[in-house]
Amino acid sequence: MICARQVFRCFKTLERWGNIVTGKAGPFFVGIAVILISMGIACFFDVIAPTLSYPLISIPICILIALNLVMHYYYVVTVPPGFVQDPPREEGKSIFWAKRLNKKGKLRSLLGGVRWTSRGVKVTPAVNTKCMKCKITRPEKWEHSVPEVMFAMIFILSAVICAAVGIMLSYHLYGISRAETSVEAQDHEEYRKKAKDRNEEFINSYDLGVKKNFQFFFNIGESGYSMTTLFIPFRINPYTDGYSWARREGYDKHQGLRQGEELTDDDEEDIY
């Protein structure tokens, strides 16, 4: 997974930069994502959607995809983190979440270092377009509501993000199929090497098979919700309470792992 490693490294670098600039990388990236998604939805339904074939079928599907994007970030902003029994979090007393204290103790806003000058990138739209088939030159007119520069920027950004998100999606789906988080995947690789050196086999006690792993992750199937929850952005509960997880029958721990070999400490430590 060399591509996935490079993509994650790139996003972590952007996260560090966002934290340096704003002091709070989470709200910064959520805000940027909401703005870009809103621009993308406006560009798509203004420019691309009217040109789609079979609009009675394609337009509702596109609306459903856009609804999933919007509701995802709505839940990110509105659903509080933690568990049900956790004490309520104190509400913020300031709306300026993008401000932070620098080393001199002065407030620095999100856009404090941004300066727009006349020497920036200049985009010149095409005046005439030549048809490659009929060799006829015709005037190029932009007859849409969104600006040309905005559409071009979102189009290029979408192509780049599509490649990055595609790599990340394949990596995470692979991890779900093996019942591993990104951290556990690294740990389990070391456990397998140690078990192999002892002529033993390491078995992940949480790996219930590809089908069961996906059913538990998305909480669908016989003991979960309907398959429609994969396509419609309902707010549903996970299958676990966050403390107990399904294991293989007859396993209360990983096979081939001995005491003291754990690389990642458990949340609950033994008290002597």
Image (cartoon, grey):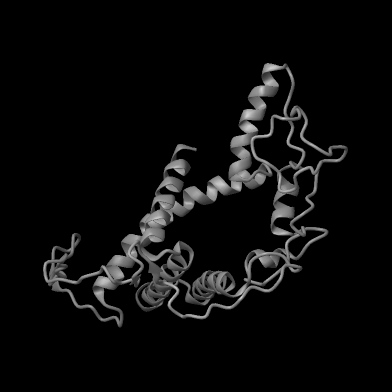
Q: Is residue 13 visible from the viewing direction of this image?
A: yes
How many numbered callouts? 0
Of the pair 47 and 73, the residue shown nearer to us: 73
Of the pair 54 and 110, the residue shown nearer to us: 110
Of the pair 187 and 164, the residue shown nearer to us: 187
Against 25, residue 127 (above or below) is below
Q: Is residue 179 shown left or right of residue 110?
A: right
Q: Is residue 147 shown left or right of residue 102?
A: left
Q: Residue at x 40, y 68 (%)?
A: 100
Against 80, residue 169 (above or below) is above
The image quadrant that residue 189 belongs to is top right
Of the pair 255 and 92, the residue shown nearer to us: 92
Q: Looking at the figure, which quarter contains the C terminus? A: top right
Residue 210 image position (x, y, % from top left): 70, 44
Q: Is residue 174 visible from the viewing direction of this image?
A: no
Q: Residue at x 73, y 24 (%)?
A: 201
Q: Is residue 11 shown left or right of residue 173?
A: left
Q: Residue at x 42, y 43 (%)?
A: 6
Against 255, residue 215 (above or below) is below
Residue at far front of view: 104
Q: Is residue 126 shown left or right of residue 247?
A: left
Residue 81 image position (x, y, % from top left): 64, 66
Residue 239 image position (x, y, % from top left): 76, 59
Residue 213 image position (x, y, % from top left): 72, 48
The image quadrant that residue 222 belongs to is bottom right
Against 169, residue 259 (above or below) is above
